[in-house]
């Protein structure tokens, strides 16, 4: 009996080994087929050439995750990425077999769970009893109903020219769970998932780089489009790389795509072209002022963009609108000239009358004539004092200091009459009337400042009514405040200038210039600040060209004043 067993043993063993060889051969063939399929399905040829948006990345990962699930026969597939801001491994959407609600609640620290261990160690893990594996996180296992799984690191490998790996970096973990048909994961599954993970890591890394660069480029383009300065970038070959909308407006070009076009084909302005050529020739920053046909003035400044080899690659031109600056400079020049004239006029009168009186050693002039001379000198001194006071107040306003305020009871009707009487002395062609009611309320205010407000408003009314006429000063009690209106029937103010007349150094343009009307351009600017210092304001109520204007000023009866600590 023993001999039969012994004699049959080797033959039976050989048959069994042959059967195992066939099974192993079959398995190897299937593995080769799966590897070939893996190569085909996960190559970059199947992916978009360049993934530049997050939706494209999600679609690509969705296809890749589907292939992973099919190849390793997993019910659930998840990609965890490490986020340095939170210090956690979070799911990269989409995941297979995991709902959005489940995914939103999963965040794993590198020191926790199987996923954390794989991320920290860089070693893959197979586990086939999730409930009893001490490395697994019970809450994740329970929430996702995980039985078994594979976790492999997502490794970015940097290679040199000889294709040798010079640096590795782990960016996350690929995790496949629940082998189908109640089976267990094995080493073949692990090896396949590691290959897939390497492909996934490359896709994710490249996609995130492109997405970051693309989003940064879009933010830069949005920023360039939103700034008011014009920007043009021109390559060393003379082609336009970038031109924002503001630059198109500066050069009076349609807002269209000019990238890649020849500079000479797009920009006709000889000054701009010369500036760019000069910058490339000199290899240093250049600048010039350009005045366009519409009288706008821009400062064009260039800057070189230098490549890694130190040679210039591009020139950036920035256009800054300096029209208002040049306008203000011109107004300041006119202001200084006008103030000099305004100061010289009363001084000339004072000097003349004093010289006349000094020369009158033989008493040619009687007492009445001398008294008239003294009155003129006194009026001119007052005029000079008012102008100097205005300049000092402007200086305080420009330096950001509060105006000096000396609050006391002010009889507005009486004060207005004094201002009217003073102004009437300077004109014979105007009829100035005080229409403020006799019972007009007494207010708390700075008497000198209210005088300056009325004096400037009445002075402007006279100045801009060169042909004479009626000028009325009226008042309205508005409860907690009063309103004073100054109405003339002069030249009026064009609508286009209504918003600017209270700015400093502004003069009404048009007929006023043709009639030789001059001024400092600070009257209404000062009136507004004096009124606002009391808690009030001034505005243009009505104006029509060649019909006249009405200015209104509002003052509270009891001002709310913030006293300045700097006097």
Image (cartoon, grey):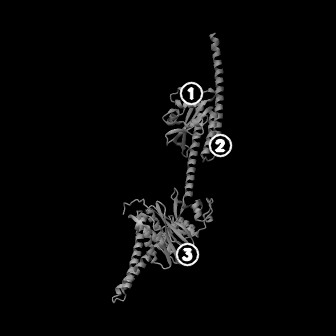
**Which residue lies at the image location 51% right of the left edge and 57% below the top edge?**
309
Q: Count the numbered circles shown.
A: 3
> Which residue corresponds to mark 3?
511
Q: Is residue 129 above or below residue 159?
A: above
Q: Tag 1's secondary structure?
A: loop
Q: Quadrant of residue 196?
A: top right
10 Å crowding of disc 2: few (<14), some (14-19), many (20+):
few
Disc 2, disc 1: CB below 8 Å? no
Instruction: Pick the quarter of the image with the C terminus.
Output: bottom left
Please provide percent x and percent y for residue 323.
53, 67
Q: Which label number is shown at residue 128?
A: 1
- Which residue is nearer to you in this view: 317 or 448? 448
10 Å crowding of disc 3: few (<14), some (14-19), many (20+):
some
**Which residue lies at the image location 46% right of the left edge and 76% below the top edge?**
424
10 Å crowding of disc 1: few (<14), some (14-19), many (20+):
some
Q: Which label number is shown at residue 46?
A: 2
């Amino acid at each position: 009996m023993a001999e039969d067993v012994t004699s049959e043993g080797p033959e039976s063993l050989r048959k069994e080994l042959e059967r195992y060889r066939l099974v192993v051969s079959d398995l190897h063939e299937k593995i080769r087929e799966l590897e070939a399929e893996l190569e085909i399905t996960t190559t970059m040829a199947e992916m978009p050439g360049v993934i530049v948006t997050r939706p494209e990345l999600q679609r690509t990962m969705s296809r890749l995750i589907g292939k992973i699930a099919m190849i390793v026969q997993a019910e659930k597939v998840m990609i965890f990425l490490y986020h340095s801001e939170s210090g956690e491994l979070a799911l990269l959407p989409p995941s297979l077999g995991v709902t959005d609600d489940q995914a939103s609640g999963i965040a794993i620290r590198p020191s926790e769970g199987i996923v954390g261990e794989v991320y920290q160690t860089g070693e893959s893990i197979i586990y086939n009893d999730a409930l009893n594996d001490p490395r697994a996180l019970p809450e994740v296992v329970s929430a996702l109903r995980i039985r078994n799984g594979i976790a492999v690191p997502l490794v970015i490998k940097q290679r040199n020219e000889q294709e040798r790996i010079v640096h590795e970096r782990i960016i996350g973990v690929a995790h496949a769970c629940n082998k189908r048909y109640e089976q267990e994961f094995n080493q073949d599954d692990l090896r396949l998932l590691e290959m897939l993970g390497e492909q996934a890591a490359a896709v994710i890394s490249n996609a995130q780089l492109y997405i970051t660069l693309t989003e940064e480029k879009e933010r830069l383009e949005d920023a360039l489009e939103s700034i008011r300065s014009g920007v043009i970038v021109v390559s060393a070959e003379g082609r336009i790389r970038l031109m924002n909308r503001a630059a198109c407006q500066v050069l009076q070009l349609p807002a269209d795509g000019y990238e890649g076009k020849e500079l000479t084909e797009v920009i006709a302005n000889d000054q701009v072209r010369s500036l760019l050529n000069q910058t490339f020739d000199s290899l240093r920053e250049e600048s010039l002022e350009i005045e366009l046909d519409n009288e706008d003035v821009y400062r064009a400044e260039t800057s070189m963009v230098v490549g890694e080899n130190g040679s210039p690659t591009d020139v950036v031109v920035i256009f800054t609108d300096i029209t208002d600056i040049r306008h203000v400079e011109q107004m300041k020049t006119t202001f200084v000239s006008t103030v000099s004239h305004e100061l010289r006029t009363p001084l000339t009168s004072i000097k003349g009358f004093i010289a006349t009186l000094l020369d009158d050693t033989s008493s040619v002039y009687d007492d009445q004539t001398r008294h008239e001379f003294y009155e003129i000198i006194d009026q001119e001194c007052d005029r000079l004092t008012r102008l100097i006071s205005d300049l000092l107040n402007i200086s305080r306003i420009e330096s950001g200091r509060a105006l000096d305020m000396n609050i006391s009871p002010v009889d507005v009707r009486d004060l207005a009459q004094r201002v009217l009487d003073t102004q009437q002395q300077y004109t014979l062609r105007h009829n100035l009337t005080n229409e403020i009611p006799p019972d007009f309320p007494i207010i708390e205010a700075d008497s000198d400042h209210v005088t300056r407000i009325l004096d400037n408003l009445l002075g402007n009314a006279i100045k801009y009514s060169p042909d004479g006429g009626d000028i009325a000063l009226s008042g309205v009690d508005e409860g907690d405040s009063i309103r004073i209106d100054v109405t003339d029937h002069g030249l009026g103010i064009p609508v286009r200038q209504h918003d600017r007349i209270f700015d400093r150094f502004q003069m009404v343009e048009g007929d006023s210039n043709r009639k030789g009307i001059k001024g400092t351009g600070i009257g209404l600017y000062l009136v507004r600040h004096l009124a606002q210092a009391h808690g009030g304001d001034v505005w243009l109520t009505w104006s029509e060209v060649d019909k006249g204007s009405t200015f209104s000023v509002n003052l509270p009866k009891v001002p709310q004043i913030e006293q300045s600590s700097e006097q």
